[in-house]
């Protein structure tokens, strides 16, 4: 079998007993790296340390992984201006946190005859939060609900972030 040293240097082709003896002398394990190769390739390494390093790398990869969270904010066609402002602030907060926001306009009864009212409210919402988010899915009517999905802006100017922090302190 072909033997590789712990530092990656090729030692050469050795008998399995000789490879085991060398690994035992160094206090290392023999790990088969390429079993299908001719001759098979084995490496001398500390297998416990190798497994630990792999788990640390996997943990780091999970830590850096982003989870896509979709928050939902519901509206009605006859929403008042103060209620609209409250929901607009909530949408902005979610977008600043990096979450997607699903804005749902719920129609009841005769409101279904005027879907344009709901579309106008969703358009007004987007116009007011356009510094913080972009439309991923345009408003579309599905049954009694009209939905629009907003995503955070990729490169938001720093002055907007600082202004938002000041506004939160005032509240």
Image (cartoon, rainbow, N blue to C red):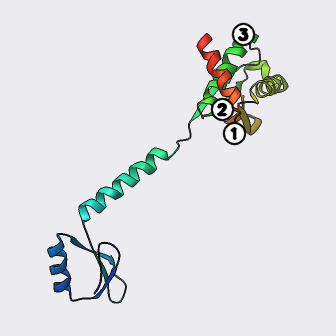
Q: Is residue 171 left or right of residue 35?
A: right
Q: Is residue 168 left or right of residue 13?
A: right
Q: How busy is the neighbourhood of tag 2: few (under 14 within 10 Å), some, or many (20 plus)?
A: some
Relative horizontal placement of residue 9, taking residue 67 as reference (left or right): left
**Residue at horizontal 74 percent and vertical 14 percent from the top:** 79
Q: Position of residue 110 (x, y in %)?
A: 79, 19
Q: CA distance from mark 2 to mark 3?
A: 20 Å
Separation of disc 1 and disc 2 at Cα? 21 Å
Name the residue located 76 percent from the left edge and 11 percent from the top edge: 81
Residue at x 19% of width, y 75% of height:
23
Disc marking residue 155: 1
* Marks 3 and 1 close (CB-CB < 8 Å): no
Quadrant of the image occupied by residue 167: top right
| Foreground disc of the pair 3, 1 | 1
Spatial distance from mark 3 to mark 1, Cα to Cα?
30 Å
Residue of label 3: 82
Tally the marks: 3
Which of these two is toward me, 3 or 72?
A: 3
Tags 2 and 3 touching, CB below 8 Å: no
């Amino acid at each position: 079998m072909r033997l590789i040293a712990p530092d990656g240097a090729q030692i050469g082709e050795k008998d399995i007993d000789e490879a085991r003896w060398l690994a035992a002398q160094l206090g290392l394990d023999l790990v088969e790296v390429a079993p299908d190769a001719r001759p098979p390739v084995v490496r001398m390494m500390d297998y416990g340390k190798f497994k630990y390093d792999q788990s640390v790398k996997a943990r780091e990869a999970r830590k850096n992984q982003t989870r896509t969270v979709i928050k939902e904010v519901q509206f009605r066609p006859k929403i008042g201006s103060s209620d609209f402002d409250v929901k607009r602030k909530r949408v902005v907060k979610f977008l600043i946190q990096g979450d997607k926001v699903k804005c749902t306009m719920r129609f009841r009864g005769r409101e279904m005859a005027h879907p344009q009212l709901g579309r106008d409210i969703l358009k007004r919402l987007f116009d007011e939060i356009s510094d913080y988010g972009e439309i991923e899915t345009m408003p579309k009517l599905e049954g009694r609900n009209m939905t629009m999905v907003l995503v955070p802006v990729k490169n938001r100017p720093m002055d907007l972030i600082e202004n938002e922090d000041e506004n939160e302190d005032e509240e």
